Image (spheres, rainbow, N blue to C red):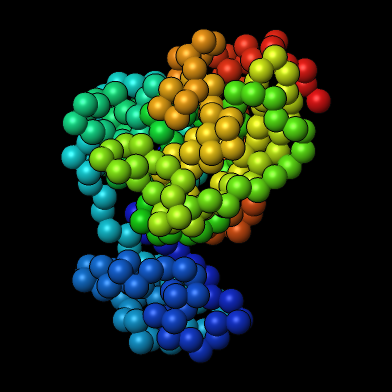
Amino acid sequence: MAVLKALRFTVEEACEGCLIKEFLRRQSVSVSLVKQAKNCPNGIKLNGQKAITIDKVHTGDRVEIILPPDDDGNVIAAQIPLQIVYESDYAMVLEKPANMPVHPSRLHLTDTLANGFCALMQQRGEQALFRAVNRLDRNTSGLVLCAMNAYAAPILAKSVQKKYTAIVEGDMPLGEGTIEAPIARQEESIITRCVDAKGQYACTKYRVLACGGGYSKVECTPVTGRTHQIRVHMASLGHPLAGDDLYGGHLTHIKRHALHCTALQFIHPVTKQLLQFESTFPADMEIFDKLMYVV
């Protein structure tokens, strides 16, 4: 699928007589994108003709705005197989395996989801910036939503909702609950987080799906998006994630923290359709089903 080069809209009756800049604002086109288009030759067109932002639009008119060209963000292309769950001109949903970072870092220059995405775009003869809307920890597996252009990115970020499944240590009571506990960085650590009254507000809703054998399967919905939020919140209840030795979990049955993004939904930026996706449970977390009874 080719990278989108321009946005095209048809003016509806509700926007009759609007200025182009107001019409584009109603279509969720950011001020920065409009500014960049204004600086491009024929960056904005009305019914196929060059236009400026103070021109008026009428019902049935066609408005076109050029999207600025992407670069690759200096990401090194690497041939990493990607499991694409969904793709359109505006969004891509990928299945990320455990032990793969989303973005490159000093210790992971060529083995990330971004590296694989860059290589995929090059194979297609395209150049596109990797824009992950939800970012998973390296050891967290599951669904990752990517925006395919600068127009879609802020719209998707506002509408995306995620559900995770965690395996935690200990038998939790079946049912639902909410954790509201502020999270801060642990003193003298750049990685570890903790519950601290001086931290940022954080809220996680959860539902215990099954328990037994010293473990519980918990569906978690983060209302906020703090670093390590689910891991810190569950540990604060005395139920660290299995395999999460950073927060008190043990490596007996799994060698990474047992957390998987199992469901993801968002509103399509243009059609406004609600799109929903689910992911199958990874094999290294399935083994816990044998240790507990499933409700």
Q: On screen, 131 above or below 267?
A: above
- Rendered location of residue 35, percent (x, y): 27, 72
Residue in the image at 44% along x and 39% along y: 228
Residue visible at 38% across and 69% down in the picture: 30
Q: Nearer the viewer, residue 73 or 293?
A: 293
Residue at left 64%, top 15%?
Answer: 288
One can see residue 90 in this view? no
Quadrant where the C terminus is found in the figure:
top right
Instruction: Identify which residue is drawn at 75% across, 32% down.
Output: 173
Expressed as whole percent of the image width and height from the top left, the position of residue 5 reads 34, 54
Residue 19 appears in the figure: yes
Q: Quadrant of residue 123?
A: top left
| 217 or 282, nearer to the observer | 217
Q: Residue furthest right?
A: 295
Tell me where residue 139 appears, x and y as whole percent: 42, 26
State the residue in front, 217 or 48: 217
In the rendered view, would you say 211 is above or below 151?
A: above
Pinpoint residue 201: horizontal percent, then vertical percent: 49, 57
| The one of 280 and 260 positioned closer to us in this rendering | 260
Give the quadrant of residue 200.
Answer: bottom left
Q: Is residue 263 left or right of residue 231?
A: right
